[in-house]
Image (cartoon, rainbow, N blue to C red):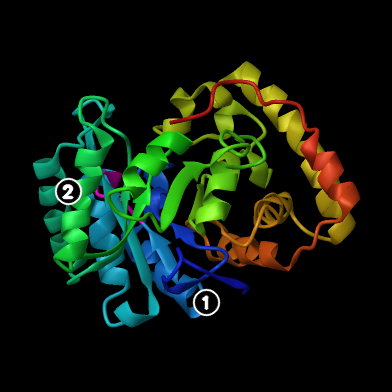
């Protein structure tokens, strides 16, 4: 797998990481299997994936516990990414929690659940409108100076907010939902990241499954799957969006590849600093996703993908 450097002086990471959220949170609750999830994370590391992303809000910390178990005895092989700044209400609604003390406590709790003495990359998951960004960022910078965190990452912010935060402490990464279907920030945030040598962690790079070509109807979503509540997966919107994936499938056919591999190859083509974080629960999808690093898109491919119509439904949050 090709590699890149996380931030200006950070560790070398593979161009494709592993997003762990779906292993225990939001997607297909009836299909979750902790033993298989732990095995899949270890398999990913075996295959050269060294950036693993989790968060304290995923399944109320259970996702971090799962990752901690999976990397036990292999800590030096993994660039461990987690984050905080969000709290889940009993009804599942997420709300910002960017107060300095809340973030200090969140870091300590993550260290405990992960069973590690430091976190390689800690992401501020959301800017709290009730707390100046510099205060939230400053509290996390204190944790870097204390040795609990190695590097910091920003959420979706404006370029000015990024500059304000970096006046306090440099950012090694920025995390955003980016895919062929979600291109917010590509005109301003990506150039800023390139200029500052900040890694762009592309979450939901397969459009939460849409770009993988596995969904045809709303009823294909398992009962209790969070996507059933999202506008892009409403029956009418989903029919429109599935039709859009045919263009991706046509590009994939030229390369003897899958739509998922083309979607990831398109992201990798944006620049060496872009690191997609696809998630999966299946070994065969893990191997398939890693194959996206081998696809070299042509100018014709890029033209065809660039002019995809906009998907129906607002972007998920």
Stretch of the chain drawn in magenta: 54-58
Residue drawn where x is 48% and y is 79% of the image: 46
Can residue 55 be found in the magenta stretch? yes
Q: Who's the residue at 40% across and 63% down the image?
A: 52
86 vs 190: above or below: above
**Residue 75 on image: x %, y %:** 30, 78
Identify the residue shown where x is 82% and y is 47%: 302
Which residue shows up at 36% across the image and 52% down it?
Answer: 153
Q: Secondary structure at mark 2?
A: helix
Secondary structure type for disc 1: loop
x, y percent for residue 30:
38, 44
Q: Residues within 10 Å of mark 2 (few under 14, many from 20)?
A: some
Query: Majority secondary structure of the magenta segment?
Result: loop
The mark found on residue 139 in the picture is 2
Tell me the distance, in whole angstroms, between the alpha carbons under discs 2 and 1: 33 Å
Q: Position of residue 108 (x, y in %)?
A: 12, 57
Residue contact at pointers 2 and 1, CB within 8 angstroms: no
Write down the quadrant of residue 19 in the picture: bottom left
Q: Which residue is mark 1?
A: 48
Residue 257, compared with residue 203, is above or below; it is below
């Amino acid at each position: 797998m090709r590699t890149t450097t996380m931030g200006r002086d950070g560790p070398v990471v593979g161009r494709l990481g592993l997003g762990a959220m779906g292993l225990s949170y939001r997607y297909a609750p009836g299909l979750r299997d902790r033993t298989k999830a732990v095995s899949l994370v270890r398999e990913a590391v075996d295959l050269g994936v060294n950036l693993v992303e989790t968060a304290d809000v995923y399944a109320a910390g259970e996702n971090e516990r799962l990752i901690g178990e999976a990397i036990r005895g292999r800590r030096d092989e993994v660039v461990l990414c987690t984050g905080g700044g969000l709290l889940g209400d009993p009804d599942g609604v997420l709300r910002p929690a960017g107060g300095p003390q809340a973030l200090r406590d969140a870091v300590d709790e993550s260290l405990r659940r992960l069973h590690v003495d430091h976190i390689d990359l800690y992401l501020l998951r959301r800017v709290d409108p009730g707390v100046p960004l510099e205060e939230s960022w400053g509290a996390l910078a204190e944790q870097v100076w204390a040795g609990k965190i190695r590097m910091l990452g920003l959420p979706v912010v404006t370029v000015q907010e990024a500059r304000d935060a970096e006046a306090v402490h440099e950012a090694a990464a920025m995390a955003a939902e980016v895919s062929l279907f979600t291109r917010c920030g590509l005109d301003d945030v990506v150039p800023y990241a390139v200029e500052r040598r900040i890694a762009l962690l592309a979450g939901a790079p397969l459009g939460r499954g849409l770009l993988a070509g596995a969904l045809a109807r709303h009823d294909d979503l398992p009962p209790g799957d969070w996507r059933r509540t999202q506008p892009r997966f409403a029956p009418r919107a989903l029919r429109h969006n599935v039709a859009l994936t045919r263009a991706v499938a046509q590009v994939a056919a030229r390369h003897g590849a899958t739509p998922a591999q083309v979607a990831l190859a398109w992201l990798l083509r944006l620049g060496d600093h872009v690191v997609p974080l696809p998630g999966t629960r299946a070994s065969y999808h893990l191997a398939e996703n890693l194959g996206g690093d081998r696809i070299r898109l042509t100018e014709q491919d890029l033209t065809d993908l660039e002019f995809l119509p906009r998907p129906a439904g607002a972007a998920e949050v």
